[in-house]
Amino acid sequence: MFERLELLIGKDNLNKIHSIKVLIVGVGGVGGECALSLVRSGIEDIVIIDFDTVDISNINRQVVAYHSTIGKKKVDVLESIIKDINPKCNVSKYDIYLDKDNIKEIFDKESPKFIIDCCDSKETKKEIIKEAIERNINFISSMGTGCKMDPSKLEITDIRKTNNDPLARIFRKWVRDEKINKKIPVLCSVEVPIKSGRVVASNSFVPNSAGLLISSYVIREIIKD
């Protein structure tokens, strides 16, 4: 099933991808699309973490969201889709809210080689970044994709080079305050956010494009050496 990919990257690189364990926190609009792209790209060992259930408001953008899946756990739905793509893929799923009280235990147990942060919680994002740096694990963190309309404005850069992203602004300050000198790879958009009131507006193409960009980044990082 990976013949077309092997033509691009070669058998050795494909085997390298097969051998890597990737952990994704948050499998909504960005994380769900990213997970499926990684599995279609040869990842055969994946950890998915999300405490949420599918809601009707997710249908406009999330790969786990259909009328038939409303009310189901996102990790359960995503696992089913992953297994339908590649029955050989090993899926470890955690229906939990990742935080400072459980992150060390899970990271110790799973020992991922790459961590992808697509969650909504600022505090969880901070814990993921700190743990990844402390453990010397490759990682990338998604910043905000809501209230944006142009996927061509998405980019992967260091947190210190971001702009027009309210969430990234918070993290730039946090990185300075914490005196973190390591590179912090993030997915962000340079598009000025569209004001939408108290509810974060969204669409089917910006978060999903972000997930694909992150997947591309992870695969290229895995095979670059």
Image (cartoon, rainbow, N blue to C red):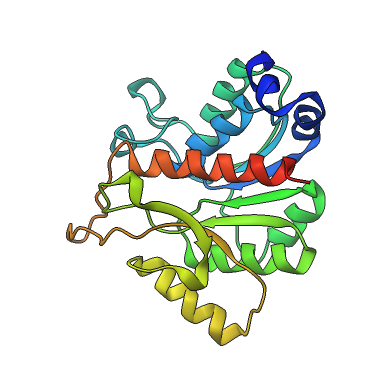
x, y (%) of residue 10?
A: 75, 25
Count of numbered circles in the view: 0
Q: Residue at x 76, y 57 (%)?
A: 105
Q: Residue at x 25, y 47 (%)?
A: 149
Q: Nearer the viewer, residue 182 or 68?
A: 182
Q: Quadrant of the N terminus?
A: top right
Q: Nearer the viewer, residue 179 or 10?
A: 10
149 vs 144: above or below: above
x, y (%) of residue 63?
A: 43, 30
Residue 151 is left or right of residue 4, and the answer is: left
154 vs 69: above or below: below
x, y (%) of residue 111?
A: 80, 50
Q: Nearer the viewer, residue 105 or 173?
A: 173
Q: Residue at x 54, y 30 (%)?
A: 78
Location of residue 66 (image quadrant):
top left
Residue 176 is left or right of residue 114, and the answer is: left
Residue 211 is left or right of residue 15, and the answer is: left
